Amino acid sequence: MSTTVKTQISVKSSGDGVVGESEWKPTILTNTVGAAAGPVAYALATGGNDITVPTGTKGFTVMPAAASIAVLKIKGGSGGGTGFAFRAGYPFSGGLPTGTVSVHIDSSTKEDVYIHWG
Protein backbone atom coordinates (compact mmCIF):
# COMPACT_ATOMS: atom_id res chain seq x y z
CA MET A 1 0.00 0.00 0.00
CA SER A 2 1.33 3.43 -0.91
CA THR A 3 0.72 6.58 1.09
CA THR A 4 0.90 10.11 -0.28
CA VAL A 5 1.96 12.83 2.12
CA LYS A 6 1.94 16.47 0.98
CA THR A 7 3.82 19.06 3.03
CA GLN A 8 3.34 22.79 2.46
CA ILE A 9 4.17 25.81 4.59
CA SER A 10 2.78 29.22 3.81
CA VAL A 11 4.05 32.45 5.36
CA LYS A 12 2.25 35.76 4.77
CA SER A 13 3.40 39.14 6.13
CA SER A 14 1.39 42.35 6.25
CA GLY A 15 0.78 45.30 8.56
CA ASP A 16 2.86 48.02 10.22
CA GLY A 17 6.53 47.95 9.31
CA VAL A 18 6.03 45.60 6.35
CA VAL A 19 7.00 47.16 3.04
CA GLY A 20 4.33 45.81 0.74
CA GLU A 21 2.72 42.44 1.32
CA SER A 22 4.88 39.38 0.88
CA GLU A 23 4.03 35.72 0.75
CA TRP A 24 6.31 32.69 0.69
CA LYS A 25 4.72 29.51 -0.59
CA PRO A 26 7.22 26.93 -1.86
CA THR A 27 6.45 23.96 -4.03
CA ILE A 28 4.59 21.20 -2.21
CA LEU A 29 6.82 18.29 -1.18
CA THR A 30 5.07 15.08 -2.22
CA ASN A 31 6.29 11.62 -1.22
CA THR A 32 4.70 8.70 -3.05
CA VAL A 33 7.74 6.39 -2.93
CA GLY A 34 7.28 4.56 0.35
CA ALA A 35 5.05 4.18 3.31
CA ALA A 36 6.01 7.57 4.74
CA ALA A 37 3.19 8.96 6.80
CA GLY A 38 2.33 11.07 9.73
CA PRO A 39 1.90 11.63 12.45
CA VAL A 40 4.23 9.00 13.86
CA ALA A 41 4.76 9.00 17.65
CA TYR A 42 8.31 9.01 19.01
CA ALA A 43 9.42 8.88 22.66
CA LEU A 44 12.62 10.91 22.77
CA ALA A 45 15.14 10.11 25.48
CA THR A 46 17.12 12.79 27.27
CA GLY A 47 20.16 13.47 25.08
CA GLY A 48 20.69 12.15 21.56
CA ASN A 49 18.07 10.33 19.50
CA ASP A 50 18.83 8.92 16.03
CA ILE A 51 15.61 8.51 14.07
CA THR A 52 15.37 6.49 10.85
CA VAL A 53 13.92 8.42 7.92
CA PRO A 54 11.29 6.51 5.87
CA THR A 55 12.29 5.76 2.26
CA GLY A 56 11.55 8.56 -0.17
CA THR A 57 11.04 11.23 2.48
CA LYS A 58 11.66 14.78 1.26
CA GLY A 59 10.86 16.67 4.45
CA PHE A 60 9.56 16.41 7.99
CA THR A 61 7.70 18.34 10.67
CA VAL A 62 8.35 17.71 14.37
CA MET A 63 5.37 18.46 16.60
CA PRO A 64 6.02 18.54 20.37
CA ALA A 65 3.17 19.04 22.83
CA ALA A 66 2.13 22.70 23.11
CA ALA A 67 2.96 22.65 26.84
CA SER A 68 6.41 21.14 26.24
CA ILE A 69 9.38 22.60 28.08
CA ALA A 70 11.97 20.45 26.30
CA VAL A 71 14.58 22.17 24.16
CA LEU A 72 14.98 20.15 20.96
CA LYS A 73 18.02 20.45 18.68
CA ILE A 74 18.56 19.11 15.19
CA LYS A 75 22.13 17.95 14.68
CA GLY A 76 24.19 16.40 11.92
CA GLY A 77 24.55 13.12 13.82
CA SER A 78 25.57 12.07 17.31
CA GLY A 79 28.95 13.81 16.95
CA GLY A 80 27.71 16.52 14.60
CA GLY A 81 28.40 19.76 16.45
CA THR A 82 26.20 21.76 18.78
CA GLY A 83 23.05 21.64 16.68
CA PHE A 84 20.30 24.19 16.20
CA ALA A 85 17.79 24.67 19.03
CA PHE A 86 14.06 25.19 18.49
CA ARG A 87 11.61 26.98 20.78
CA ALA A 88 9.97 24.58 23.26
CA GLY A 89 6.39 23.66 22.43
CA TYR A 90 6.49 24.87 18.79
CA PRO A 91 6.56 22.66 15.69
CA PHE A 92 9.41 22.94 13.21
CA SER A 93 9.89 21.68 9.65
CA GLY A 94 12.78 20.98 7.35
CA GLY A 95 13.56 19.61 3.94
CA LEU A 96 15.91 16.64 3.58
CA PRO A 97 18.49 15.96 0.87
CA THR A 98 17.86 12.90 -1.28
CA GLY A 99 19.29 9.80 0.37
CA THR A 100 19.01 10.99 3.98
CA VAL A 101 18.65 7.87 6.14
CA SER A 102 18.42 9.37 9.63
CA VAL A 103 17.99 12.59 11.58
CA HIS A 104 19.46 13.28 15.00
CA ILE A 105 17.39 15.13 17.60
CA ASP A 106 18.80 16.08 20.99
CA SER A 107 16.26 16.61 23.76
CA SER A 108 16.88 18.37 27.07
CA THR A 109 14.46 15.97 28.77
CA LYS A 110 12.31 12.92 27.95
CA GLU A 111 9.74 14.10 25.44
CA ASP A 112 6.95 12.57 23.35
CA VAL A 113 6.70 14.11 19.89
CA TYR A 114 4.94 13.40 16.62
CA ILE A 115 6.79 13.55 13.33
CA HIS A 116 5.04 14.00 9.99
CA TRP A 117 7.20 12.60 7.20
CA GLY A 118 6.51 14.00 3.73
Image (cartoon, grey):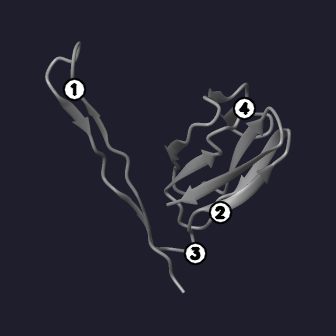
Under mark 3, the amino acid is Ala
Q: Reading the chain from its start, which is encountered first: label 4 or label 2?
A: 2
| Residue 92 found in image quarter | top right
Decide which of 5, 57 is in the foreground and name it: 5
Decide which of 99, 68 is in the foreground and name it: 68
Q: In this rendering, which labeled residue sits more in front, label 4 or label 2?
A: 4
Secondary element at tag 2: strand
Under mark 1, the amino acid is Ser
Q: CA distance from mark 3 to mark 1?
A: 38 Å
Under mark 2, the amino acid is Val
Q: Reading the chain from its start, which is encountered first: label 3 or label 4?
A: 3
Residue highlighted by disc 2: 40
Residue highlighted by disc 4: 69
Residue highlighted by disc 3: 35
Could you tell me which residue is drawn at 20 percent across and 30 percent down? 22
Q: Are marks 2 and 3 in contact (CB under 8 Å)?
A: no
Q: Which mark is residue 14?
A: 1
Under mark 4, the amino acid is Ile
Please give left or right for residue 11 compared with residue 106 in the image.
left
Q: CA distance from mark 4 to mark 1?
A: 31 Å
Secondary element at tag 1: loop
| Residue 11 found in image quarter | top left
Report x, y in % for residue 55.
Answer: 59, 67
Decide which of 15, 23 is in the foreground and name it: 15
- Residue 78, above or below 2: above
Q: CA distance from mark 2 to mark 3?
A: 12 Å
Number of numbered callouts drawn: 4
Report x, y in % for residue 112.
Answer: 75, 50
Q: In this rendering, which labeled residue sits more in front, label 1 or label 2?
A: 1
Crowding around mark 4 (Cα neighbors within 10 Å: few <14, some 14 to 19, many 20+) is some
